[in-house]
């Protein structure tokens, strides 16, 4: 296979961030005003493989993402917010014209929380399927619009899966 039609990408990242200043516990439902925002450390790893050159009729892409977030302060409120997630995705871009492609995208993400407060399982799986268009307006300007469906199922049997409309611009 010609190497010019293939691309392999890797990305590793780390960020120290915080939730919205002044609002604590928004994830746990215990909204408290404070001058000290919840701070967290997050590591992320991305990998991707693409097959198809710039003038190809179809371009296939596979992606993988791993993300882990751990809260660094206010542990009495934030220990239940620590999580990790793994995601995989596939995209097919079919060239409709030289500057426009029809795009099909399917992705799955698993989210695992480190702790379960009072035995409540918040781990879950998210699956999405989208269809859309990608266009090149000029040499440096591109656009994307995608619509589709998303399903989120919590591993707990107490809560049913939720299906919604989703989009990307």
Image: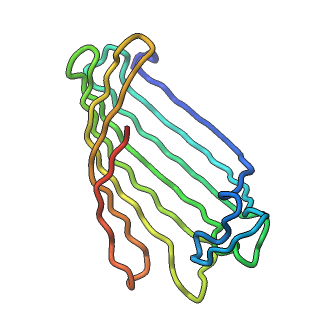
> Relative to 18, is 15 above or below?
above
Quadrant containing the C terminus is top left
Q: Residue 78: x, y in percent?
A: 69, 72
- Which sits in the foreground, 122 or 11? 122
> Relative to 75, is 16 above or below?
above
Q: Residue 43: x, y in percent?
A: 68, 50
Kindly indicate the quadrant of the structure image that contains residue 113. bottom right
Q: Residue 118: x, y in percent?
A: 59, 89
Kindly indicate the quadrant of the structure image that contains residue 108. bottom left
- Which sits in the foreground, 96 or 28? 28
Determine the residue located farthest toward the left in the rendered image.
96
Kindly indicate the quadrant of the structure image that contains residue 22. bottom right
- Image position of 159 (left or right of 33): left
Total tally of numbered discs in the picture = 0
- Which sits in the foreground, 37 or 80? 37
Residue at the spot 62% in from the left edge and 37% down from the top edge: 11
Residue at the spot 29% in from the left edge and 50% down from the top edge: 129
- Image position of 78 (left or right of 92): right
Residue at the spot 55% in from the left edge and 68% down from the top edge: 112
Determine the residue located farthest toward the bottom in the rendered image.
118
Q: Residue 135: x, y in percent?
A: 31, 22
């Amino acid at each position: 296979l010609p190497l010019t039609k293939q691309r392999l990408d890797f990305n590793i990242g780390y960020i120290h961030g915080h939730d919205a200043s002044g609002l604590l516990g928004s994830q746990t439902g215990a909204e408290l005003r404070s001058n000290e925002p919840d701070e967290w450390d997050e590591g992320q790893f991305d990998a991707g493989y693409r097959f198809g050159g710039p003038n190809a009729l179809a371009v296939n892409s596979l992606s993988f993402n791993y993300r882990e977030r751990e809260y660094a302060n206010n542990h009495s409120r934030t220990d239940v917010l620590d999580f990790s997630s793994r995601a995989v995705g596939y995209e097919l871009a079919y060239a409709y014209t030289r500057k426009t492609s029809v795009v099909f995208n399917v992705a799955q993400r698993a989210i695992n929380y480190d702790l379960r407060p009072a035995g409540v399982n918040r781990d879950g799986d998210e699956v999405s399927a989208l269809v859309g268009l990608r266009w090149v307006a000029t040499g440096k300007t591109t656009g994307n619009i995608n619509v589709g469906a998303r399903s989120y199922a919590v591993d707990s049997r107490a809560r049913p899966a939720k299906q919604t409309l989703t989009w990307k611009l």
